[in-house]
Amino acid sequence: MDFPLIQKIVHEELEAAYSRIIERLEDSGPDDNSCPGLPEDLPPLPNNPKYQKALDLYLEGASHSQVSRELGTSMNNVKRYYNWLVNHGYLNAPEEPLSEREQEVVKCLFEKGMSLVKTAQHLGISVPNVVQRRDSALRKGYKIPLDYRHQS
């Protein structure tokens, strides 16, 4: 085994994980951000300036890739920002047809009220796969029922 290579990989992974954890912690608190032209009953943006910047970029018509480059963050983080902004009414996702599996996932989660774990077990897929398909459905414009909005 190449011990120095293993050390290097572990160090890089730990640094990446540390950055993601810090970013998520910064995301967790409410902020007094206000967005002109948006309904006033929206929940406050998370206490992370990247949400506001992402919102501004999306409202200007930027793509996920452009937002990722501009914010200097991963595509996964950009998609998380986008999903949050869509779920909480700041953005409207363009409607695209859902795959059969995406339809099954959102039905289990939002119509049947199943947890991520129960949905994964029911469909015979992994929890990360459920999350990925749920998020994909949201990016395709799936509208979360009103009784589930603002819970995430």
Image: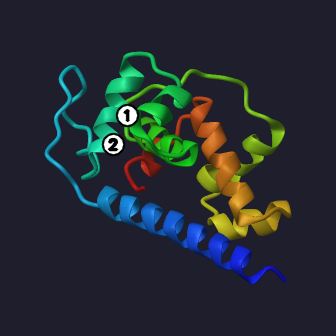
Amino acid type of the residue tagged 2 in the rendering: Lys
Q: Which residue occupies the extreme left position in the image?
A: 32
Q: How many labels does the image show?
A: 2
Q: What element carries label 2?
A: helix
Distance of label 1 from label 2 (alpha carbons): 6 Å
Labels 1 and 2 touching (C-beta < 8 A): yes
Q: Which residue occupies the extreme top position in the image?
A: 61
Residue in the picture at 53% in, 41% down = 79
The residue that disc 1 covers is: 54
The residue that disc 2 covers is: 50
Q: What element carries label 1?
A: helix
Residue 2 as seen in the image, left or right of residue 127: right
Place residue 138 in its image quadrant. top right
Residue in the picture at 41% in, 28% down = 91
Q: Position of residue 87 (x, y in %)?
A: 45, 41
Q: Where is residue 23 in the image (x, y as percent from the top left)?
A: 38, 58
The answer to whether residue 17 is above or below residue 100 is below
The answer to whether residue 146 is above or below residue 27 is above
